[in-house]
Image (cartoon, rainbow, N blue to C red):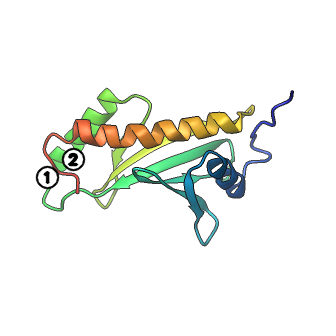
Amino acid sequence: MSVELVTPENLTVDLLSEIYEAALMEVTIDEERSFVRIQDDILARARVPESKERIQLGALYGIKEDAQRIDRLELVNRVNDQFVLIRASITEAGDLYFDYDIYIKGGVTRRQIAQATRMFLKLVPKAVADSDEDGIID
């Protein structure tokens, strides 16, 4: 039994949408067809960069406007210290951004993509709950 691998040669936003729908995820493709929106406990995006060597997952959380920069950075440091599979950063607008890349160079299965995405969708809310000691996330 052969398994069709997802590779840089066949990776598209449409294929990602198919994979997520088959995994019973609630998804939509944006109007420009540049990413897939995934609605779970959080709203996340899956994007295919030009190189097509990876799938970029991302999720954005607002931070209270009156939160100090040092509090924002301490939050990011706590997340990055405690959760090594996802990365947190602060955007130029001051929001909290989480990301994770699924590398597909050499090929990965559809199931591996769905499982890695589910892991991201579960870890991000846990990171928010466990790391927001100062209550600065909106």
Residue at the bottom extreme of this rendering: 31
Q: How many marks?
A: 2
- Kindly tell me whether residue 49 is visible in this rendering: no
User: What whole-number distance in Å separates the C-alpha atoms at marks 1 and 2?
Assistant: 6 Å
Amino acid under disc 1: Gln
- The residue wearing badge 2 is 72
Mark 2 and mark 1 in contact (Cβ < 8 Å)? Answer: yes
Q: Which label is found at residue 68?
A: 1
Please report the residue visible at 75 percent of the width from the left and 31 percent of the height from the top. Answer: 106
Q: Label 2: few (<14), some or many (≥20) within 10 Å?
A: many
Foreground residue among 7 and 40: 40
Can residue 121 be seen in this snapshot?
Answer: yes
Percent position of residue 123, x then y? 39, 37
* Residue located farthest toward the right when viewing the structure as drawn: 1
Against 34, is 19 above or below? above
- Give the image quarter of residue 80: top left
